Image: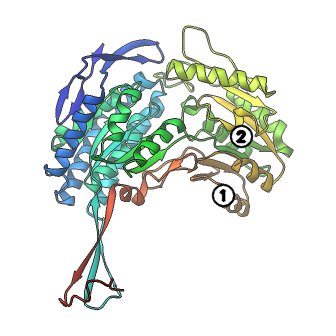
Amino acid sequence: MLNYQMLIGGQWCEAMSAERIESIDPYSTKPWSTIPRGGAEDAKAAIDAAHAAFKDGPWSQMNPTVRGALIRKLADLIVRDADKLAGIEVQDNGKLLVEMTAQLRYVPQWYYYYAGLADKVEGHVLPIDRPGMMSYVRYEPVGVVVGITPWNSPLMLTACKLAPALAAGCTVVLKPSEHTSASTLEFVKLFEEAGFPPGVVNVVTGYGSELGEALVGDRRVRKIAFTGGEQGGRQVAMRAAQDFKHVTLELGGKSPNIVFDDADLDNAVKGAISGIFAATGQTCIAGSRLLVQDSIYDSFLARVVDFARQARIGDPRDPDTQVGPMTTTVQLEKVLEYIGIAQSEGARCVLGGKRLGEDNWFIEPTIFADVTNDMRIAQEEVFGPVLSVIRFKDEDDAIRIANDSLYGLACGIWTQSMNRAFKVAHAIEAGTVWVNTYRVASVMAPFGGFKQSGLGRENGIEAIYNYLETKTVWINYENDVPNPFVMRI
């Protein structure tokens, strides 16, 4: 049993309550580590440290090239420890080791990318239309950032927030999910080794209900970067609005995966399977609505069911396993409830639909046919291995069904017609559209959602501007001050 501590102001510490939370291995369903149960006082201490590091420490005043060099050193250390960190994530969230290893080996790219960008954020001189005046624009770090991350991909989703924040010159308080804090606490051990000043990065652990108000409500916090559920995002946005904090929200989805009758069907089957059953469906970009054209509906459904039936379920550490357990018992019960809802609404279960025994957290890969888009199973995020298959007639019908959702995070399109690919991609209301592929990501590609899938974008060059304030400076070089009672226009 490992007992982790929080990191505040460069010091490892217990929660002021001295209470701890057990972390459960989703495969064995047994506790394997504990984390501190932080509260409002711990959150305040972490913000104190981050604020002091920003206002009085060297970080925000540091030459951006030097800042970038430290971030690059951190990336080198992640490369060294990637496999170790991946193993911890698997033990904490039950996702496949092969996936988490690939993910953690890519995570350093976020830090390399933003390390290089740290000294490329350039201000500019305006060709101002006022005689005797010079005006220029500069970008300054917003200040203290709170990053709140979920349990499904802790360190990758941390990187999306932390890397641009550090490159911008901000200081950060991280709050990982109470279910999967271990990998974050292991990861932040690397900051001292990399040479970061104390207080630049801090971690508080515990329940969101006990930490949220203290973290989001503190006026010294100027930016919240949140990944999680729609309800949590709404609460963050409403509370942050009271102090007009900057907010980035990466929330849920009910993403359509659209298969046209001219698609390469072999690849489309693989795309449908990876879209929903990879990561056991516990991903915001899950292609949980499979839209299939009428003319191929029955045959394509049969192929998807046959492929999914062969999925190997088991120990996520086994390289042959393809579907792992649910991460938490709460999520397990939620998915089972939605399976019951789908059946009560008249959807036809053609595969799975059951829990695999009572002494584990596995749910069979589940496919529902005869789903209509007004059913709850097609409108609400399940976040599990449950696929809803929906018929459509033509391009316009596919677009109508795909956009008939409160969400707009991602979409897949399967067709061999480039004309159709561009037409449909441009008509879909989603932040990411994949054509003839699914679940591809890059640090270079902006990511975020339309509608209730969130606010703002992570990744890419534009992400760093979410952590910067824009300042305009005016200089009167003629020393001619006109009538002070009249605005100079």
| SS class, disc 2 | strand
Vertical placement of 139 versus 270: above or below? below
Q: How far apart are marks 2 and 1 (CA)?
A: 16 Å
Query: Residue 56 location in percent, x, y?
Result: 13, 50
Left or right: 245, with 53 as reference point: right
Kind of residue indicated by mark 2 = Leu
Q: Which residue matches tag 1?
A: 425
Q: How many marks?
A: 2
Kind of residue indicated by mark 1 = Ala
User: What residue sits 26% from the left and 88% below the top?
Assistant: 483
User: What residue sits 37% from the left and 59% below the top?
Assistant: 465
- Mark carried by residue 232: none
Q: Which residue matches tag 2?
A: 290
Circle 2 packing at 10 Å, graded few (<14), some (14-19), many (20+), is many
Residue farthest toward the right in the current orientation of the protein: 295
Left or right: 68, with 238 as reference point: left
Task: Look at the numbered discs 2 and 1 and tell me whether their residues touch, using CB distance below 8 Å.
Answer: no
Query: Residue 260 location in percent, x, y?
Result: 77, 50
Circle 1 packing at 10 Å, graded few (<14), some (14-19), many (20+), is some
Residue farthest toward the front in the current orientation of the protein: 485
Looking at the image, what colour scheme do you see?
rainbow
Q: Can residue 447 be seen in this view?
A: yes
Ranked by sequence position, the earlier of labels 2 and 1 is: 2
Q: Is residue 312 visible?
A: no
Of the 4 image quadrants, the one containing the C terminus is bottom left
